[in-house]
Image: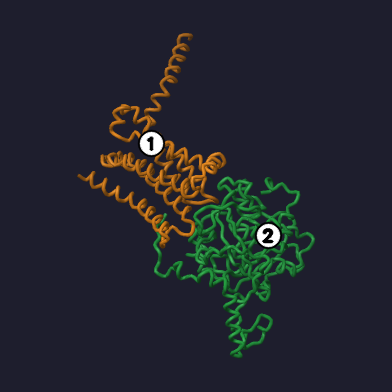
Chain colours: A green, B orange
Amino acid sequence: MVIRHRAPTDLRASDITPLALYRNRRAFLSMLGAGAILAGSLHAPKSHAQSPDQSARFDPYQQAPRNQGLSSSEELTAHEAVTSYNNFYEFGTDKGDPARYAGQMITAPWSVLVEGACERPGLYDLADLVPMSDLEERIYRLRCVEAWSMVIPWIGVPLHKILSPLGPTSKARYVQFETLADPKMMPGLAYPVLDWPYVEGLRIDEAMHPLTLMATGLYDAPLPNQNGAPLRLVVPWKYGFKSIKSIVAIRFVEKQPKTSWNQSAPSEYGFYSNVNPDVPHPRWSQATERRIGDFRRRDTLMFNGYADQVASLYTGMNLRRNF
Amino acid sequence: MTVKLFKILIFGLFSLPALWLLGQWGFYAMDAPHDLGFNPQEASNRFSGIWALRALIVALALGPVALMFRLTWPIQIRRMLGLFAFFYASLHLSSYLGLDLLGDMDAFWEDIKKRLYILFGLGAFLCLIPLALTSTKGWIKRLKARRWKQLHRLVYLAGILAALHYLYMAKGNQLEPKIYAAIITGLLLIRLWRLWPRIKRRTMKPIAQDITIKRDKAQARS
């Protein structure tokens, strides 16, 4: 292991917006807004953003409303941790590699190939696939299979809002997603840690579930590359590797699609990979986890604490066998 | 003279990582900026583990190096490297058991039962304990050189187990654990190759006798 010293340009904890201030930013913004009303130059609210002179100042990420009902009220994981402690093996297996190398990934223009059992397959430009006017903020817990976790303020749209307009047919029982695999931009592809490109999948009812989010941003800004820009899945009740990054293809399929970690070690990573403290993993006990920033471990919750919303998806299923 | 210089040099070199690690945990404890990253326990486990493996590899390599270049100093610093391997393995275990599991012995026992790489790692550590304990001149005398040498061949088992520990720990198809495993395998093969004449003499003799007896009988019959 290489001993790394802090580069002078690196952020320190003291440089980051204090959490209290971050949490109150909407109040702060509305206060500014109130001031603006008095000053007679109101910051355009979302529904009026079309008028050309104001659109330049409209930032869909700053103004994405928080979905309070689906958001956790736990303390957020520091922005610096969320954006520099990552697993994105296309850039290397070290947690710091994605932040180090993902900057060279070109994310605009970005197109997504939609194929398989749907009425409107084709190559879509990102803007045509994701309804930017529907962006919302959701604070979700993220539980990595390596037994650490974070709390992240994502910005995105529920996946069903992207999938439904594509018209999945009755044969679309599963959805497969694929990550970009461009060796020119992704140094990690030089070695077959996994069988590239990275693929993941969901059952169609999991994909259509209201909790399942297609994120394009976090912490009030577009996704940093290391977090899977410009488009990544967030499935909060499953281990993090299910939440595939930098998506270039969406396929509606009839049979359970292959998924990368399952192909790499079928006995360790199942297709479902729901967070489950009672099903131990050959590498890590899943009974406890370390919230990044905490010294002690805490107990892991069934379905990562989302059991009320998602347990019904799996009624009658043996979760020990379908891990 | 040169041996002493080498000893001081190697001692300093292998002390630095431990000092760095302890210093970083010191900063962490004082809530000061540190370089352990966002998952200090993971960083600390990996850092101490990789240095244990490195010290062990250097200790294993010193014998062949001494022979190849007809040097004596590598043999004279070998014990120190072995003790460093034990020291870093102890740090590694303490980091995992103390800082990561916070002394939760039930969790540790579950890990041993369910996770092969933990079992391999523990095995490697257990192999190193008697070697560290009998590393003094007094013990060499007490055990007699021959038996002491036999006991200390355990270091190869420790090496194999340590390599397996790392291989089984890494997820996916990663290169680094394979490199370490290849180096340890190479060093083990050199050792076997040098021991081969002795092994052959010991195991082939009875067979050779058997063959001559059969031949004699056959000749007697004809």
Work out whether A136 lies above or below A143.
below
Density class for disc 1 (Cα within 10 Å; few <14, some 14-19, many ≥20) is some
Work out whether A3 lies above or below A39.
above
Answer yes or no: is residue A184 visible: no
Q: Residue at x 56, y 57 (%)?
A: A149
Where is residue B77 shown, x and y percent of the image?
29, 42
Q: Residue at x 52, y 67 (%)?
A: A79
**Residue to which mark 2 is pinned:** A176
Disc 2: host chain: A
Q: Nearer the viewer, mark 1 or mark 2?
A: 2
Q: Quadrant of residue A134?
A: bottom right
Q: Quadrant of residue A310?
A: bottom right
Judging from the image, what secondary structure is the residue with disc 1 in? helix
Where is residue A100 shown, x and y percent of the image?
47, 64
Q: Nearer the viewer, residue B101 or A240?
A: B101
Q: Which mark is residue B191?
A: 1
Say left or right for A309 vs B222: right
Q: Which mark is residue B50?
A: none
- Same chain under badges 1 and 2? The reply is no
Task: Identify residue type, mark 2.
Answer: Gln
Judging from the image, what secondary structure is the residue with disc 2 in? strand
Q: Quadrant of residue A245?
A: bottom right
Task: Identify residue type, mark 1.
Answer: Arg
Work out whether A237 lies above or below A221.
above
The residues tagged by marks 1 and 2 sit, at their Cα atoms, a distance apart of 51 Å
Picture quarter with the N terminus of chain A: bottom left
Answer yes or no: is residue A216 visible: yes
Say left or right for A14 vs B8: right
Q: Residue furthest top?
A: B221
Where is residue B161 shown, x and y percent of the image?
46, 39
